[in-house]
Amino acid sequence: MRILYLSYRYPPVARASNLHRSLAETLVARGHEVTVVTKYPTEYVPEDESVPDQLPVREVMRGVNVVRVRGLPGVHRAVVMRALEYIIAGLAFVRAIKAIPRPDVMLTVSPPMTVAFVSAFYSRLARIGCVLNLHDLYPRTAVELGLLKNRWVIWAMKRLENAIYRLSTHIVVTNRGSVPYLIQQKKIPSEQVSRVPNWVPLDSLSSNERAEKFRIGHGLEGRCVVSYAGVMGFAQDLSTIIDCARLLQARSDIVFLLIGDGVYAEKWKLSAAGLENVRFLPSVTEERYYDALRASDIGLVALTESLESPAIPGKMHNIMAVSRPVVAVVPSKGNTAEVVRESRCGFVVVPGDKEDLRNRIEELAGRPDLRNELGAHGRSYAEQNFSLEKAADTYERILKDAQDKPI
């Protein structure tokens, strides 16, 4: 198949882009031709010698044809600026799609909704099947986070959301709670909805030797490393983690390592100012990311209490995959909490309960046997549920069906 893959982020962009890279490369390895259209990375590029100062607009990366489009530079905290960036990106994606030879099928990632809409609309006009990879439910998520309050804007975005679903040939969701939302509330036929959890390249997750070098390089020898590695954005509330670190200042054997960037990164750095047991690192390459996770003794996941939409941060899959225990500071009734309890990979702490978080971290810090037990449970669950090969099998089938049955 000739697959046109539209993803707002793709390497060398940091953060969630590696999820799409691994799927694209696996599809290429299976004999498919994959072209990815993505946003040109500006300051998202990690500080790494392997990444040139100027990236080509077109190149072939590990067999994947990559086309980069320009948008607004920078990370925008203001909702208006972020909305403008998404609109400009959507228009840029249209121009790129028109210049690419006709594919057999399209795969597009949402959010942002603008990119999902233009790809679904184009696919309908061209009579090409379009598979929607739906990661987050917008505008619902933006409303819950307090980013959208104007009722007319919310109304317009809901109309856009409905149009995207109707125009898509098939919808793939990552969270189990999204399935009933689409079928029951949005009236999408059940045969057009599938769930594929985020995947992890289970057989290529760094090594213990590299992890030890990471610990030595950052002066972490002999200490219990509690890490948060991921996006520091609107949906991730790190206040409980920083408050807990403040309670544990007297424990010189415990250090908090916060890795990543995002619109709230500076906010959390200011909040942790003066805490000697908290260290920040910028976003790192995928290889170094797994080095950091393996070098950790405890992995943290965080979501804001106001987020009720189905959400499972991809970082949790990675923590489980490297056999580390998870402490999830998330709403107790969400999908993330369900997976932690179901897999028995760690503990759930309600956002804001810094005392409970301290107790859990101190318990794990003092019990290597418990860390190993929870880590083993997480790894076993990841092998059964988060396999890249299993995800690729499902996507391959769905894409073939969409190619044969475009709406």
Image (spheres, rainbow, N blue to C red):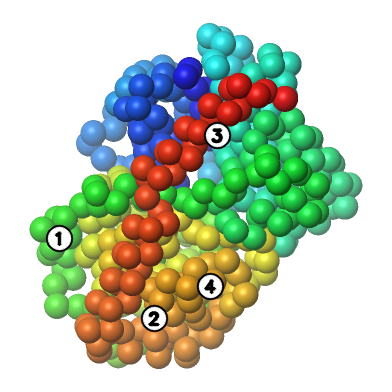
First in residue order: circle 1 vs circle 4: 1
The Cα atoms of the two marked residues, 3 and 2, are separated by 45 Å
First in residue order: circle 1 vs circle 3: 1
Q: Is residue 11 left or right of residue 163?
A: left
> What residue does disc 2 label?
245
Q: Position of residue 193 (x, y in %)?
A: 65, 44
The Cα atoms of the two marked residues, 3 and 4, are separated by 29 Å
First in residue order: circle 3 vs circle 2: 2
Q: What residue is at 62 percent from the left and 75 percent from the top?
A: 333
Whether residue 89 is visible: no
> What residue does disc 3 label?
398
Mark 2 nearby-residue class (10 Å; few <14, some 14–19, many ≥20): many
Q: In terms of image quadrants, where is residue 20?
A: top left
> What residue does disc 4 label?
337
Q: What residue is at 67 percent from the left and 31 percent from the top?
A: 169
Tag 2: residue type?
Ala
**Residue 208's disc number:** 1
The Cα atoms of the two marked residues, 1 and 3, are separated by 37 Å
First in residue order: circle 3 vs circle 4: 4
Report if the CB atoms under discs 1 and 3 are less than 8 Å apart: no
Tag 3: residue type?
Ile
Q: Position of residue 205 (x, y in %)?
A: 25, 52
